[in-house]
């Protein structure tokens, strides 16, 4: 039984080592997409509001880099980032969107209230496209280059300081 | 002034803990009697100083002294008085001070009262207690001083969050703390006995009330926490295998095993090394639990204010205490003489099986809790939930219940099958009848089916030890065992019934619509907006009738808070003896409909009634043990007195 005790001791030492290692690691609050650097999966979403077309993966590979915003009308940070999306659009960014788990009338109301910077909005009722992009929440914003490859992911609402970062990433994706 | 007094008392208490450790360590050697004599007084004075420090903290909170940083951060002059007081320990620093105070109090009590063990073992125990205490003193004084002053007194406190003004929330953490501290005392006794190699039945008897006390608090804490999660989270579940829940379950499992093996040691002088190891493991589990919860290395639905620096501190303490104790155990255990032998078919044999099963369940829960951490170290995120814990835990839990049913019927040391044939057959007949009945009439899943069967078997078996005995002269600890085991059956029945017979309806109802769930008919009478201090809510008025009977009203709410913006569901419950109606209102659906989630949960409340019964059993056993100790002590005093007069 002596060996058993030493094995137990070794296990506990290993456990403490694990704890110490994990404590020293930076805590990841956000789940990063594993799709960065990959081509966007094929999809074709119908429109959710009458005045904007839906969104397909082909639209994202038309040679022009774009921002892809994942949002929902029921999401408070999505409303909070609306002014900065408007600034991005004013700076020349082409922004398309995926509205997840939402209803047409709510989305229309949301766009009415907070502005509509989107050239296309796809309707993703069961978050299928959101998940295939590697996005785990709303809002998230992706930079997609002209060939439909995901270049950059921004998690959470777009703050004032993030606008220039996104514009730079967008420029780089177009280069 | 009061804050400075508290801080000074705390520093002095820490210094005395240092003295207690040093004097104990030196006093254990040859010729250290003069120093050894200091250990008990040091522990007693330390307890008084901690009481002063904690009293000072209560006082600054009671007066809302806003020049103290902790008060300014966690209290408010307009808070109700009871929540001002509870605010003293409702934060990291205060809760740590509560911890060391209770621990010092326990140490003082032992030093003042306990005279049954050899003095060297007592000195070693108190030194170990001081060693554990010193770590917490260092933690408090270096990184979390509760008495820190602000350079300028704050104009008003920041702690007026009505969400946190909840009596359950105020008293739930201290309950678990008392449990953890009780286990720290058991740990110190185990270390003391290891150091002096004096593992005797007397030692188990001295340790047992502390284990029992800790175990009662842990049982109540877990039961209350489970009910809180059930009604507050609005999902209708009562156990989520969340890391924070597991952190409180693991010490309980270890304490349960320890309780039973200490009984064997006390009655039969067997299982010596095993009892010592469980004493170390039980406290280790409470420290690991605290570490996992407070360091934030695991993600949980219970958001704690986490701080990696504190995590590091607790980890160092953890390594010192547990690593040190296990190393000591590994070195010393072979030198502890083997205890009494017993045959497999005996009370001891059953208790060993129970112990092994409990330890296995503990290992399963520990593995499941830590597994996500392990894989994350290699860059893979997983989450471990009920699909792992339930079936894998059941592999050991269900056989353990069979042993729980039979074990108390066995005699100590050696027994024969013939002697217990009649009661075992009776239990088996009841179990098979329930098994067949439930199987044919209800057609439910395997785990609930086995759960029901074993609940019936354990319920019958738990009262069998009463047969042929005079109920009036039955010792309290036996009553305690019977009631606690019966409580296990009650809780198990509740769990099985809930998982087998719960009826759930998700409906989109217009005002005036009626939905049925189980035997209930529920009409949505109205949906009204209501407002609270920092929230607005939609309140549904539901008229519910059980089996066509009288109508009762329920009012679940969907609340929106604005600081921080957050949506919560306030469930509304209607309790009957045979179950609970659980209602939640969601958002507005299309066409003026409202989303309602309705559950009929037969016998779900029995889960918590069972938990309370288990704790009550522990309480009776504790009273019985303590009064027995007191009687013996006064009898000894009288003998000593008589001898004294005879000599004179």
Image (cartoon, coloured by chain):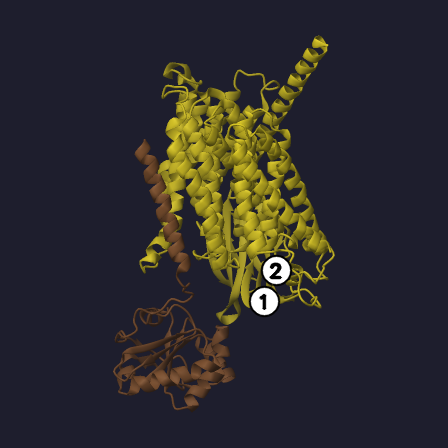
Extreme residue in the front direction: B31
Depth order, front residue of B626/A72: B626
Q: CA distance from mark 1 to mark 2?
A: 10 Å
Q: Is residue A16 visible?
A: yes
Q: Quadrant of the C terminus of chain B?
A: top right
Location of the N terminus of chain B by quadrant is bottom right
Q: Nearer the viewer, residue A165 or B447?
A: A165
Please provide percent x and percent y for residue B546.
Answer: 56, 47
Which chain is painted in brown?
A
Q: Chain of mark 2?
A: B
Q: Position of residue B398 (x, y in %)?
A: 39, 35
Q: How many marks?
A: 2
Residues flagged by tags 1 and 2 on a common chain: yes
Image x and y of residue B458, in percent = 46, 30
Residue B438 in view, yes or no: no
- Judging by colour alone, the chain drawn in yellow in this rendered image is B
Q: Which residue is mark 2?
A: B163
| Residue B63 position in % (x across, y down) | 74, 57
Tag 1–tag 2 contact (CB < 8 Å): yes
* Chain containing the residue with disc 1: B
Q: Relative to residue B410, is residue B622 drawn left or right?
A: right
Q: Is residue A42 above or below residue B93?
A: below
Q: Residue at x 32, y 32 (%)?
A: A2
The disc, 1 or 2, on the residue closer to the chain's N-terminal end is 2
Q: On the picture, is B27 further left or further right than B8?
A: left
């Amino acid at each position: 039984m002596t060996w058993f005790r030493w094995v137990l001791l070794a296990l506990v030492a290993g456990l403490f080592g694990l704890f110490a290692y994990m404590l020293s690691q930076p805590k990841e609050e956000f789940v990063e997409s594993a799709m960065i650097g990959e081509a966007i999966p094929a999809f074709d979403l119908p429109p959710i509001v009458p005045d904007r077309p839906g969104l397909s993966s082909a639209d994202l590979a038309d040679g022009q880099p774009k921002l892809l915003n994942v949002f929902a009308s029921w999401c408070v940070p999505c409303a909070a980032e609306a002014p900065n999306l408007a600034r991005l659009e004013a700076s020349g960014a082409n922004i398309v969107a995926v509205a997840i788990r939402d209803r047409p009338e709510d989305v229309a109301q949301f766009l009415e209230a907070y502005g509509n910077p989107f050239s296309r909005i796809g309707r993703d009722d069961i978050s299928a496209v959101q998940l295939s992009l590697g996005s785990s929440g709303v809002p998230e914003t992706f930079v997609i280059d002209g060939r439909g490859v995901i270049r950059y992911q921004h998690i959470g609402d777009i703050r004032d300081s993030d606008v220039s970062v996104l514009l730079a990433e967008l420029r780089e994706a177009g280069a | 002034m009061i804050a400075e007094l508290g801080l000074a008392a705390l520093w002095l208490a820490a210094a005395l803990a240092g003295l207690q450790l040093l004097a104990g360590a030196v006093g254990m050697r040859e010729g250290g009697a003069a120093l050894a004599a200091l250990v008990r007084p040091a522990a007693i004075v330390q307890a008084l100083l901690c009481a002063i420090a904690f009293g000072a903290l209560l006082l600054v909170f009671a007066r809302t002294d806003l020049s103290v940083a902790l008060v300014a951060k966690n209290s408010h002059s307009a808070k109700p008085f009871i929540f001002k007081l509870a605010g003293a320990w409702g934060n990291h620093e205060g809760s740590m001070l509560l911890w060391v105070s209770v621990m010092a109090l326990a140490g003082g009590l032992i030093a003042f009262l306990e005279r049954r063990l050899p003095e060297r073992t007592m000195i070693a125990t108190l030194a170990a207690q001081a060693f554990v205490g010193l770590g917490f003193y260092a933690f408090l004084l270096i990184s979390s001083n509760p008495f820190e002053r602000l350079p300028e007194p704050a104009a008003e406190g920041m702690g007026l969050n009505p969400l946190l003004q909840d009596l359950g929330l105020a008293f739930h953490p201290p309950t678990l703390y008392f449990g953890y501290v009780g286990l720290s005392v058991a740990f110190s006794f185990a270390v003391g006995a290891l150091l002096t190699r004096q593992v005797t039945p007397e030692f188990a008897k001295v340790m047992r009330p502390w284990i029992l006390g800790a175990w009662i608090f842990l049982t109540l804490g877990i039961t209350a926490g489970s009910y809180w999660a059930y009604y507050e989270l609005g999902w209708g579940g009562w156990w989520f295998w969340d890391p924070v829940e597991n952190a409180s379950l693991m010490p309980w499992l270890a304490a349960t095993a320890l309780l039973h093996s200490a009984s064997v040691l006390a009655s039969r002088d067997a299982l010596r090394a095993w009892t010592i190891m469980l004493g170390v493991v039980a406290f280790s589990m409470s420290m690991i639990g605290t570490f996992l919860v407070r360091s934030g290395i695991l993600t949980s639905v219970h958001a704690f204010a986490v701080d990696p620096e504190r995590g590091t501190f607790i980890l160092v303490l953890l390594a010192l205490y547990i690593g040190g104790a296990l190393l000591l155990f590994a070195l010393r255990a072979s030198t502890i003489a083997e205890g009494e032998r017993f045959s497999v078919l005996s009370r001891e044999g059953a208790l060993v099986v129970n112990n092994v099963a409990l330890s296995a369940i503990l290992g399963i829960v520990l593995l499941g809790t830590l597994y996500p951490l392990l894989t994350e170290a290699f860059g893979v995120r997983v989450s471990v939930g009920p699909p792992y814990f339930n079936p894998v835990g059941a592999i050991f839990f269900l056989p353990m219940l069979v042993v729980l049913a039979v074990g108390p019927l066995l005699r100590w040391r050696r027994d024969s099958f013939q002697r217990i044939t009649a009661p075992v057959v009776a239990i088996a007949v009841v179990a098979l009848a329930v098994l067949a009945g439930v199987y044919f009439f209800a057609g439910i899943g395997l785990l609930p089916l086995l759960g029901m069967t074993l609940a019936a078997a354990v319920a019958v078996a738990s009262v069998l030890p009463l047969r042929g005995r005079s109920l009036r002269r039955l010792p309290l600890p036996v009553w305690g065992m019977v009631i606690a085991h019966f409580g296990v059956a009650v809780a198990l029945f509740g769990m099985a019934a809930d998982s087998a017979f719960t009826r759930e309806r998700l409906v989109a109802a217009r005002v005036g619509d009626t939905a049925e769930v189980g035997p209930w008919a529920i009409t949505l009478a109205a949906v009204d907006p209501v407002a609270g201090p920092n929230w607005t809510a939609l309140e549904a008025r539901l008229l519910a009738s059980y089996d066509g009977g009288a109508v009762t009203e329920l009012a679940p709410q969907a609340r929106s808070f604005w600081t921080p913006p957050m949506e919560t569901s306030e469930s509304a419950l209607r309790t009957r003896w045979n179950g609970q109606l659980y209602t939640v209102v969601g958002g507005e659906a299309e066409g003026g409909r409202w989303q309602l989630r309705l559950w009929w949960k037969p016998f779900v409340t029995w889960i918590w009634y069972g938990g309370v019964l288990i704790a009550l059993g522990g309480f009776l056993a504790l009273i019985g043990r303590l009064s027995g100790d007191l009687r013996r002590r006064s009898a000894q005093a009288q003998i000593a007195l008589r001898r004294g007069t005879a000599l004179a």
